[in-house]
Image (spheres, rainbow, N blue to C red):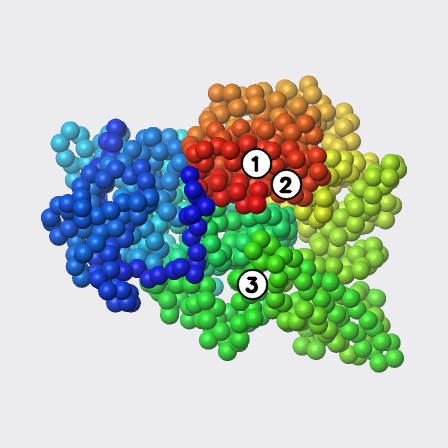
Amino acid sequence: MSQSANVIYLKDYKVPAYLLEQTTLKFELYPTETLVSSSLSFVRNPECTEHNPALTLLGHEDLELVALSLNGKALAESAWQREGETMIVAGVPESFTLDVVTRILPQENTALEGLYLSDGMYCTQCEAEGFRRITFYPDRPDVMSVFTTTVEADQAQFPVLLSNGNPVASGQTENGRHWVTWEDPFPKPAYLFALVAGDLTHIEDHFTTASGRDVLLRIYAEAKDLDKLEYAMESLKRAMRWDEEVYGREYDLDIYMIVAVDFFNMGAMENKGLNVFNTSCVLAHPSTTTDAAFQRVEGVVAHEYFHNWSGNRVTCRDWFQLSLKEGFTVFRDAEFSADTNSRTVKRVEDVALLRTAQFAEDAGPMSHPIRPESFIEISNFYTLTVYEKGAEVVRMIRTLLGEAMFRKGSDLYFERHDGQAVTTDDFVKAMEDASGRDLSQFKRWYSQAGTPELTFSDHFDAASGRYTLSVAQRCPATPGQPEKLPYHMPLAVGLIGADGQEVTLDNGATTQILELTDSEQSFVFEGLAEKPVPSLLRGFSAPVKFSYPYTQAQLMFLMAHDTDGFARWDASQQLVVGIMHQLMAAREQGDALQLPEDLVTAFRAVLTDTQLDPAMVAKVLTLPSEAYLAELASCIDVDAIHEVRCFLRSALAEALEPEWLATYNAHQTVGSYSPDAESIAHRSLKNLALSYLMALETDASLTLAMQQYESSDNMTDMQAAFSLVVHSGFSEAAAQLLGDFYQRWQNESLVVNQWFAIQATDPKPGALARVKALLQHPAFDRRNPNKLRALIGNFCAQNKVNFHAADGSGYNFLAEQILLLNQQNPQVASRLLTPLTGWKKYPENRQILMKQALEQIMACKDLSKDVYEVVSKSLA
Ligand code: TRP
Ligand code: ZN
């Protein structure tokens, strides 16, 4: 396969030659095949300057064409041509109707793109290019059309038949079949089309919009999950209200539906009026769902709802603009979660994700700007860069413009482009026009890849009271981009005096937004009595790496006095990372590892300060992850990172044992389970304390964990105890709980996934053998992406010491699994590959083995585009 020839470039964008006024679809679902009949009314696009252009449709290579006619007349084979994914019909009139019939086999669709079966239920996934697996169609986001869809199936087996918009007609036919017709009045691209047919139950509710319209809300699932839908419904109503209050946007149809499916490649999909969700992002119940999963449900429900404006009403012109909808929508859902729960906690979690996974992506072979310039397979660009860094770029615009101007800009964007397919340039233009600000330099954030690095230094002149803060920016080279130009970014800065008081700055506040535009720049503050300690990038005001030569004492000072929650947490991270680096150096020298007394003092101060928010205490006292330390390293020594982290955890456990125990006891939640921010905070601190106590490996700590496992009334506490015991050296107790947990939860698919995940992430030796054995477990299903991620994904991405075993066994395992999945589910195969792509950052012995694994995959003759793109770029 010469996939290298099929690179798609942003610069090659051309407007479509024909526009679609109406799409009428009929699906006849049968056990052995599905017939799709479509009737498409095309008109010439006045914006296309070509003379008599041909009509270009897209259809997957394997798509079977049954019939094709133009204005009611069957088209001769010579009237059209198929090559790869394109079908070209030449000599078409100015306006015409094309009728297409295709035959598809959803029951054999394992890629989970297009129409497929999830646990006996028909559903679709059309983003980005799945619609072309259903029928021949102008499957590109700038072709928008209204849809009328009729779904026909066996009534007993598929009593519920859904599609986008409103149901307008239904009826029965012979042989026990029935049909429903749906009409979606809002023009949309094919990627937002959805169909669901199954034996589903639902809960329902109503929402009254600000203007007084009544919206019917329904969440559908299999009958066994009916009791797990309430939280998603409450989250949906909160999100709808929030978008009205914060953005002035109302929902537009009379019905909003969410369907939970177990087989899904991603988290969820914002299809107009008919969202399809991975069960993991919608089902929630205290006895089966952890706090983290509750919060994910709330966030994803909100995200998909927010897409109704940022994505559906205003959509993307082409897939290079993906961050237009995803970056903006992630920003919107993050703000919703911050307003609904704890703002600082949400920010800390998002920054931690960005700094570990997104920074690693920026530094690896797949590095790309938030608006990529080329791709082989667009599915590979649903990345942390497009989503999370994209959201940071929108956040920076808001910081630069201020809240009021940002709202004015978003209003202008929605008004100007409602019903259109647009570009990130259009988004920025609306922000510029509304605010009068020039964002031309800022736009480099859309075109340059890589994580900028800021180096701060300062100078205080005691005689004049003048404090000068200097900063230099650089951005490392990334594939195809050797040189970078300086970025325009906001630096939210505060200054703290020796007494711990914040200095009032020129703007009359204690935080000021400095605008960095040059590669080197200085900012001057006058009238200071003494040299302050700077608090830099408050709220993480730009997605960059930054350094200032803080002493340990200054970091501890910031931990105690900074009024910015993010900055306080960040100071603690810098302190602990510095100490871990010292310990790694000591280990390298063969010296014994020693716990610095200063760290004990700092931890004790935080642990015993009852005024602090317990959620922040838990964040501050959680040691930086192995993944974050790996990202910071220029050459990753997996074993050193793991050992030093384990040492520090045990040493801190021992040094502060009475404090951990007191904390564990003080933060027990009473009353029935609730996933509100405050209760979550107490549970997170309590379970962190338990994890330190378990690091002591004493019988007393085991007793505590076993008691918590037995007596907890919620999955958060149960799973925390379970996972600590399984990962501990108490092998008998671990074996007992593994059996017990499975016994209790074997009928809850999502809990069984956690049971797989916890075993896959057990750092003890022998994990690979255990994972291989679990692949044979009856509950494992290799067609289900959630199961693949739970076992294979977690082992390779989270269990670093075992995946990176010196004999290369982890790498070989992943290569084998990728080859097994390559044809079956290319999207998931390509994502699971990520841990191999960063091979250049490992020591030479690992590099050789990782590269061999990649080459083994590359040698396969029928690689999917998805896998080919990632492997070839990794080896380049
Ligand atoms: N647009 C979806 C979101 O909300 C992403 C998505 C869902 C997706 N399913 C997909 C992307 C399948 C690619 C393939 O973010
Ligand atoms: Zn999205």
Foreground pick, 323 / 568: 323
- Contact flag, marks 3 and 1 (Cβ < 8 Å): no
User: In the rendered structure, which amino acid carries the disc numbered 1?
Assistant: Leu
The residue sitting at 48% across, 20% down in the picture is 778
Crowd around label 3: few <14 · some 14–19 · many ≥20 (10 Å) = many
Of the numbered discs 3 and 1, the one sitting upstream in the chain is 3
User: In the rendered structure, which amino acid carries the disc numbered 3?
Assistant: Trp
Name the residue tied to disc 2: 839
Of the numbered discs 1 and 2, the one sitting upstream in the chain is 2
Position in image of residue 382 (x %, y %) = 48, 49
Q: Secondary structure at mark 1?
A: helix
Position in image of residue 431 (x %, y %) = 48, 71
Q: Is residue 441 left or right of residue 304?
A: right
Disc 1 to disc 2, C-alpha distance? 9 Å
Toward the bottom, the furthest residue is: 464
Q: Find residue 445 and name its label.
A: 3
Q: Secondary structure at mark 3?
A: helix
- Contact flag, marks 1 and 2 (Cβ < 8 Å): yes
The residue sitting at 48% across, 39% down in the picture is 867
Foreground pick, 75 / 215: 75
Query: Which quarter of the figure has residue 220?
Result: top left
Judge whether 404 appears above or below 23 on screen: below
User: In the rendered structure, which amino acid carries the disc numbered 2?
Assistant: Trp
For discs 2 and 3, the disc positioned in front in the rendered view: 2
Name the residue tied to disc 1: 854
Judge whether 602 appears above or below 744 on screen: below
